[in-house]
Amino acid sequence: MSIKALRGMKDILPPLSHKYLRFIQAASKLAQNYSFDYIETPLLEETALFRRSVGESSDIVGKEMYQFIDKGGNDVVLRPEGTASVVRSFIEHKLDKKGGVHRFYYYGSMFRYERPQKGRFRQFHQFGVESFGEPSVYEDAAIILLAKEILDHFKIGYTLKINSLGCPTCLPPYRQKLVEFLQSHEDICDDCKRRRDLNPIRTLDCKNPHCQEIYKEAPKLLNHLCSECQREFDKLQELLRNEGVYFEIDEHLVRGLDYYTRTAFEFVSTELGAQNAVAGGGRYDNLVELLGGRATPAVGFAIGIERILDLLPDEVPSREGIYIGVLDPEALDLAFDLATKKRKTAKVFLEYKPKSLKAHLKSADRHNAKYAAIIGEEELKQNTIWIKDLEKKSESTIDIPCFLEL
Ligand code: HAM
């Protein structure tokens, strides 16, 4: 039986891979414009990293981790997300002790053992940014604007949802009220009962319609924010409005990971199915300290690349590069040498098999080349090349120095 890719894991072949690269290039450029630097962290991390950061109440840690014991007996996991790894790296390299602001962007594979469906995979790709050391709400706004710029660049339609998840001053008394409310509703689902004990605010984004109906009556965190959280949330809205950003406040937006404080946001596409979140993020001011570093405010987001690629129209490729073909086998050495020289500056497709002129022109067209360069017996003798400009449909015979200048 032939071996296939694992369920929920996909190959990215052309032309999809072209879109993937185009996305990475444009998103990287925009992140650099916002002063973010590239960072790369390992795909494998200690399991404890995600248990402590993403949290025991999350589906990611509770059900979805690709976790195993490696040959050295280490308990490891294929990273389900990027934030925890970047925080680990930030602390390990003592950037927390250095102070100042450090901004990073990254992209790559993430792994979650979820039930695969449209827009949901077990190996998927994120483009993410993490900013450390900046407590100002202007940074939250800048991060949201960066995500928006990236989506706008690709003309992705979305709704931006924002919420505030409070801070260690206002969250605990609110949590207590919510727990009392949840305890008075024994008919909530089993998942919510588990969350009630681990991280009660995570109940609020339960997808079960019965629970959703109940939570309409639940006490609202936005009515319990402390004055500072309220001021920051108001300022965030003002900054977004000033930049002409349309947003909705979603008081049930709590995000699926436990580390958030204050700002939480998601970009939700109207053009996707059930898996409609294209990007999500927020502030996580306690995570660096929680993972053993010096207390450092932080904020970030990640975009799901597969969901973006799904929304991008197919490219209409323009003609590019040179197709080189030979009419006789004797011309192949020269063709090979010319191809090597041209490849320093241009895209070259070299056909090794001698063919008729007509067959070569057909192949050049199929390869979407801008020029077809053909060498036969006559050209070999004269040290020339027959060229056809496949856009302008013009033909000429040129000498080799002229061809190398093309
Ligand atoms: P997240 O909301 O879990 O956040 O994931 C971010 C995005 O990754 C989602 O909005 C979605 O587009 C995509 N995504 C998640 N799971 C899948 C999947 N199974 N298949 C395809 N796409 C998926 C985080 O991961 C946080 N680390 C974001 C962050 C960065 N917060 C602060 N900094």
Image: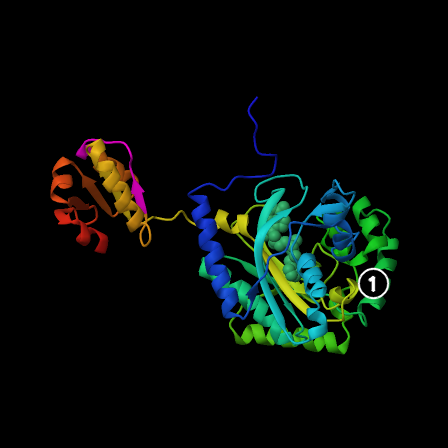
Is residue 156 among what the camera can see? no
On the rendered structure, is 321 left or right of 146? left
Looking at the picture, does residue 188 appear above or below residue 300? above
Seen at 22% across and 56% down, the residue is 405
User: Residue 292 appears in which quarter of the rendering?
Assistant: bottom right
Between 373 and 23, the one nearer to me in the picture: 373
- Residue 79 is situated, as x and y percent measured from the top left of the image, at 67, 49
The answer to whether one can see residue 102 in this image is yes
Is 10 situated above or below 193? above
* Residue at 14% across, 49% down: 398
Q: Nearer the viewer, residue 37 or 332?
A: 332
Q: Which residues are magenta?
A: 348-358
Q: Is residue 357 magenta?
A: yes
Residue at 73% x, 74% y: name it.
Answer: 229
x, y percent for residue 371: 23, 47
Q: Is residue 396 left or right of residue 186?
A: left
- The residue identified by callout 1 is 175
Is 56 in the magenta?
Answer: no
